[in-house]
């Protein structure tokens, strides 16, 4: 059954999370709507730290979303919001567990903490709680299981790509090379997963090798550069991934 998502939400999502949106659009219509709803929910959580001036205000916003989930899962009237309405529909249609969605909130709330990661394992745990939890939920919406390693690979690649912005912050205690190595290792593990019909949920993960290759070039400065490649090249990579069924 189609889920109505406001056009303004989709437009904002395309700007905030273009790679996941490109992948989701390769899924069958019903699955596509579910994935886009999930990603819109995640986008609302991810932007919280940018909207608040102190952690306490951010914590209140995350609790607002936990309370909204409580209304959805308890069958109560759901508070009005441009994302809560489609999210409630998605939950009712799919039977996704509250645990998976709460896990995403918990992971994103770490963004309010300026404390640097002490070890590379701290970085991996963060990737698992954010991109990993989101990937697991997306795979569930496609009727599959797993996705953690693909999410970890994407999350660690994201940390490597954003090293320039956080080298004096949460990444100050980590070496760039260790982050990139963790992303590479997670991607190798992710490729072993038989994703089947869930591949559109994780097709964006196929972009990981391209990012890592660019960051491994001689002269690349992680503290001064942010790698990327063209939308067209990304689209081709994801199309091939969906066609073959493998990252």
Image (spheres, grey):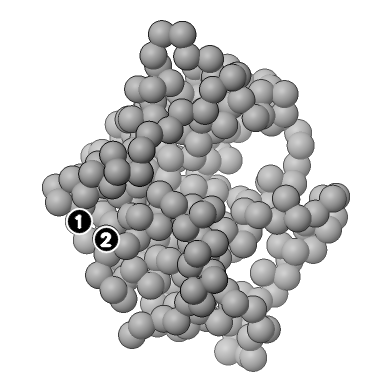
Q: Which mark is first along the chain, 1 or 2?
A: 2
Which residue lies under the disc numbered 2?
A: 26
> How many numbered tags mark residues here?
2
Q: Position of residue 242 (x, y in %)?
A: 20, 52
Q: Indicate left or right for 43 with 157 as reference.
A: right
Residue 190 in sight here: no
Left or right of residue 125: residue 37:
left
Q: Report the Cα–Cα distance between label 2 and label 1.
A: 14 Å
Q: Residue 39, position in %: x, y?
A: 48, 61
Residue at 53% x, 53% y is: 16
Task: Examine the rendering and report whether any part of residue 44 can be seen.
Answer: yes
- At x 51% / y 77%, what residue is drawn? 6
Q: Which residue is farthest top?
A: 218
Q: Residues within 10 Å of mark 2 (few under 14, many from 20)?
A: some
Q: Residue 52's spot in the image, x, y percent?
A: 80, 54
Secondary element under disc 2, as helix, strand or loop, is: loop
- Up-down relation of residue 56 to residue 189 (above or below): below
Residue identified by numbered label 1 = 196
Front position among marks 2 and 1 = 2
Q: Residue at x 75, y 64 (%)?
A: 61
Using the rendered view, name the quadrant where residue 191 is placed: top left
Task: From the viewer's perspective, tell me whether residue 192 is left or right of residue 223.
Answer: left
Q: Position of residue 116 (x, y in %)?
A: 71, 29
* Residue 180 drawn above or below residue 103: above
- Residue under the image location 50 percent in, 44 percent down: 128
- Residue 139, compared with residue 82, is above or below; it is above
Relative horizontal placement of residue 104, taking residue 23 as reference (left or right): right
Secondary structure type for disc 1: helix
Specify the quadrant that holds the N terminus. bottom left
- Asked whether disc 2 touches disc 1, contact meaning CB atoms under 8 Å apart, the reply is no
In the image, residue 13 above or below residue 94:
above
Dividing the picture into quadrants, the one containing residue 169 is top right
């Amino acid at each position: 059954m189609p889920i109505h998502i406001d056009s303004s939400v989709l437009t904002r999502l395309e700007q905030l999370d273009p790679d996941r949106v490109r992948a989701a659009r390769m899924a069958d219509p019903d699955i596509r709507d579910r994935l886009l709803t999930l990603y819109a929910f995640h986008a609302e959580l991810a932007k919280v730290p940018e909207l608040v001036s102190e952690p306490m205000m951010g914590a209140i916003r995350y609790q607002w979303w936990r309370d909204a989930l409580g209304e959805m899962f308890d069958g109560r009237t759901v508070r009005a919001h441009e994302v809560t309405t489609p999210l409630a529909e998605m939950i009712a249609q799919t039977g996704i567990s509250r645990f998976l969605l709460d896990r995403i909130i918990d992971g994103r709330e770490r963004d309010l903490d300026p404390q640097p990661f002490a070890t590379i394992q701290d970085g991996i745990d963060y990737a698992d709680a954010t991109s990993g939890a989101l990937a697991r939920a997306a795979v569930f919406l496609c009727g599959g299981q797993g996705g953690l390693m693909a999410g970890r690979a994407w999350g660690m690649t994201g940390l490597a790509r954003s090293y320039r912005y956080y080298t004096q912050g949460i990444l100050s205690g980590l070496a760039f090379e260790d982050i990139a190595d963790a992303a590479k290792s997670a991607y190798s593990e992710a490729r072993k997963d038989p994703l089947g019909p869930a591949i559109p949920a994780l097709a964006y993960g196929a972009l990981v090798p391209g990012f890592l290759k660019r960051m491994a070039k001689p002269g690349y400065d992680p503290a001064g550069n942010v790698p990327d490649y063209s939308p067209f090249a990304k689209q081709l990579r994801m199309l091939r991934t969906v066609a073959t069924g493998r990252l």
